[in-house]
Amino acid sequence: MNDVVNGCNGHHDDGHPGSGHEEGQRFLAEAFRAIVEEAICKGVDAKEKVCEWQDPADLSALLDLDLRDDGESHDQLLRRVRDVAKYSVKTSHPRFFNQLFAGVDYHALAGRVLTETLNTSQYTYEVAPVFVLMESVVLQKLRSLVGWREGDGIFCPGGSMSNMFGMNVARFRAFPGVKQQGMWALPRLAVFTSAESHYSVKKSASFLGIGTDNVFIVKVDKRGCMVPEDLVAKIEDAKSQGAEPFFVSATSGTTVQGAFDPLDRIADVCQERGLWMHVDAAWGGSALFSKKHKHLVKGIQRADSVAWNPHKMLTTGLQCSVFLTKDTTNLLKQCHCANATYLFQQDKFYDINLDTGDKTIQCGRKVDCLKLWLMWKAVGTKGLAERVDRAFANARYLAEEMEKREGFELVGEPQFVNVCFWFVPPSLRGKKNSADYSEQLSKVAPAIKERMVKRGTMMVGYQPLNGLVNFFRMVVHSPQVSQKDLDFFLDEIEHLGSDL
Ligand code: ABU
């Protein structure tokens, strides 16, 4: 820490008065100290709160958010850094189970800090030489886990964008004229996805001008997996309405239940009809690391494209999402490129294929590969596989413990690391047949959530789903979570719900 505080070994300034380097580097060193103490050390300490809850008006006043004409002192600014850390939710905390991301990987975090510090854009080799080569290696490695020896891909700003790239590239393959002629080149198009797929499929259809009415929702079974027979029925239905099917988005690891669609059977349907098969494996893709659990994504290699978010189960930190395709005909670039002459000059002194930035719809693009690469270097493929296996084992442990305790009722047997359950408080036990049981049960999860957030002891999400009233979705995947944390979780739910 002292080395950090000492800055650049005494080489603070460039000699030019007023450059601000010396002062800036001193601030940075002290800010780093505050960040390590407040956000990292306290952030992972089970004895600390997950969240220092404040009502919005109080928080706004506490933080003194107004921006003024004059700048503040060094000490005031350091207090601001500490306050931001103090009042933010500690997603690295071992009792943060609220989202599909959690925990911290220190090597990945070092990669995140270095990425921010180097502050470049991942579009050309000339400004991002290390990262262009690194991105290519990481994408190739992820593709090989999917089961493809060749293909293409790009890091995207989040899984929704990766899913949208799948839809856009699929449409371009089917109707290349769309890039120039827009909607004039298109018939009414039809997209297919399951009732429990991610909302980004509908958002993409809206954004791309396909329209949410043209997203045909395929039925799921009780576990939340797409029913292939209904996919066939929905394709026939779309055709009978005069729409042209072109894209099926299957899901590996649905957001709420963690369900895996039957990819081989969906691939058969797509193959017979010449439809682009995309797999939203943003959440469940990481099962590919595990010899024991990768059967869940059996058939994924038959897809045309895959979205996968290492920032979820692999704990790289937000955001780290890839769009992968097995296409080898340069579809991704042809679909998205605009050939800006000030970035992608054709007469450069190096191989211009290294200027990968025109494969995406972005111009400036954040470097998202370094955190994953450094973490992967640190623990190896075996280390990542162990993490995935540990997450499955923790989820199993939690589900089994719930079965032993009164009041915990699983929504279904977990397929993945999402453990969905109702907590039935003492006052509702044995009253399933009473007329207002569902209504009363629906109020339990929000009430417990409010109490846990205000106490700051833990965070877990809840939602209704397909006619089921509010239930908790416990997501167990951070490598920092121990069985002790899971026991604490169960005790705390019992405690918070004991008088409801
Ligand atoms: N992209 C879906 C993630 C939402 C969640 O964390 O639950």
Image: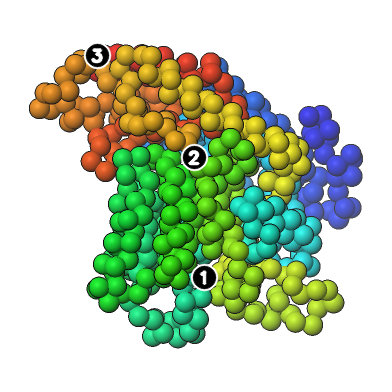
Image coords of residue 153 (percent x, y): 62, 62
Residue name at image x 18 percent, y 30 percent: 438
Secondary structure found at label 3: helix
**Disc 2 residue: CB within 8 Å of ligand 1:** yes
Q: Earlier in the sequence, mark 2 or mark 1?
A: 2
| Screen quadrant of the N terminus | top right
354 to 65, vertically: above or below? below
**Between 150 and 268, the one nearer to me in the picture:** 268
Kindly report the distance in space between the C-alpha atoms of the residues bearing marks 2 and 1: 27 Å
Is residue 280 at least partly visible in the picture? Answer: no
Q: Is residue 389 above or below residue 250?
A: above
What is the x, y in percent for residue 492?
A: 41, 16
Please tell me which residue lies in front, 302 or 116.
302
Question: Who's the residue at 46% across and 80% down the image?
Answer: 175
What residue is disc 2 on? 100
In the displayed structure, would residue 209 be above or below residue 302?
below
